[in-house]
Amino acid sequence: MNVKDMPLMEHIVELRKRLVIIAMFFVAFMVAGFFLAKPVIVYLQNTDEAATLTLNAFKLTDPLYVFMQFAFVIALVLTCPVILYQLWAFVSPGLYEKERKVTLAYIPIALLLFLSGVAFSYFILFPFVVDFMMRMSNDLNVEQVIGIHEYFTFLMQLTLPFGFLFQMPVVLMFLTRLGIITPMFLSKIRKYAYFVLLVIAALITPPELVSHLMVTLPMLVLYEVSIIISRVTYRKMQQTEEKESHYVS
């Protein structure tokens, strides 16, 4: 049965099925996160940025909170491929066979972009921000007493958003293929998109020009790349439609 012919109740049942599968995988990966959290935390504590700091626990529950936080993030990251596949499985009945194969290829691309975003933030942006904060403390003659909870929360707040922001090209390509947006629309709202990206960059970076530019410029480049990818996808869709209409006629 085509997805367009399915009644609303069947859509709801199908969606519930997909959500249950995601929840089951998340619980399983959460258990795995309990075993992976400690080595990940220990590794991050021995990096160059953390090795120069003394991480303190200001509350008795801070170590437990950090451990649970990492277990949750690990489970969420490991569940992302399952979420993407279940999303594809939910919408794929409404796609042509060729579209199903193409959109299925989005999953490894999305994972690669996510890891690229996290790597960019962790290896390039995060060391710069830490160094900037420490230099500012030294200039003001302030001795930093850093809590382990605050340190790792700041690390995640700075790195994880980039993993999702780097999904922009594949998300817009997917929406273009579904006919929800067009490259013309993306070009038309460019100035508004730039403003939103500037606001996002201001929210996730310290109030300092260089770090703000280090975040803003890659996001603007990603948006322009997204427009190019959307334009290519839209052109291929039009060519396919023209061929199909030619065969019908």
Image (tube, rainbow, N blue to C red):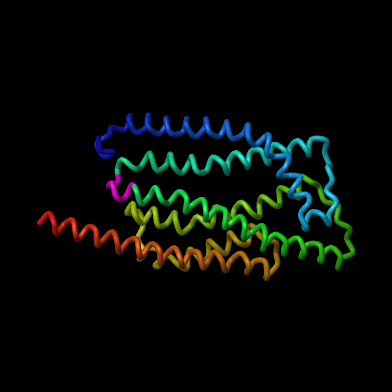
Image: 244 above or below 63: below
Q: Position of residue 145 (x, y in %)?
A: 86, 52
Quadrant (top left/top right/bottom left/bottom right) for the C terminus: bottom left
Frontmost residue, 140 versus 43: 43
Say which residue appears at 83% left-offset and 48% top-offset: 55
Where residue 12 appears, as percent x and y from the top left, is 37, 31
* Nearer to the camera, 163 or 135: 163
Q: Report the magenta stretch's main SS.
A: helix
Vertical placement of residue 106 versus 72, above or below: below
Query: Is 84 positioned to the left or the right of 156 in the image?
Result: left
In this rendering, position of residue 34 left or right of residue 231: right
Which quadrant of the structure image shows residue 26? Answer: top right
Indicate whether 135 appears above or below 34.
below
Quick check: is 97 in the magenta stretch? yes
Give the answer, above or below, for where 123 lies relative to 146: below
Q: Where in the figure is residue 148, as x and y percent of width and height? A: 79, 46
Provide the residue span drawn in magenta.
95-100
- Which of 136/25 is in front? 25
Q: Residue at x 63, y 62 (%)?
A: 202
Q: Which quadrant is the N terminus positioned in?
A: top left
* Residue at image point 28% right, 59% down: 237
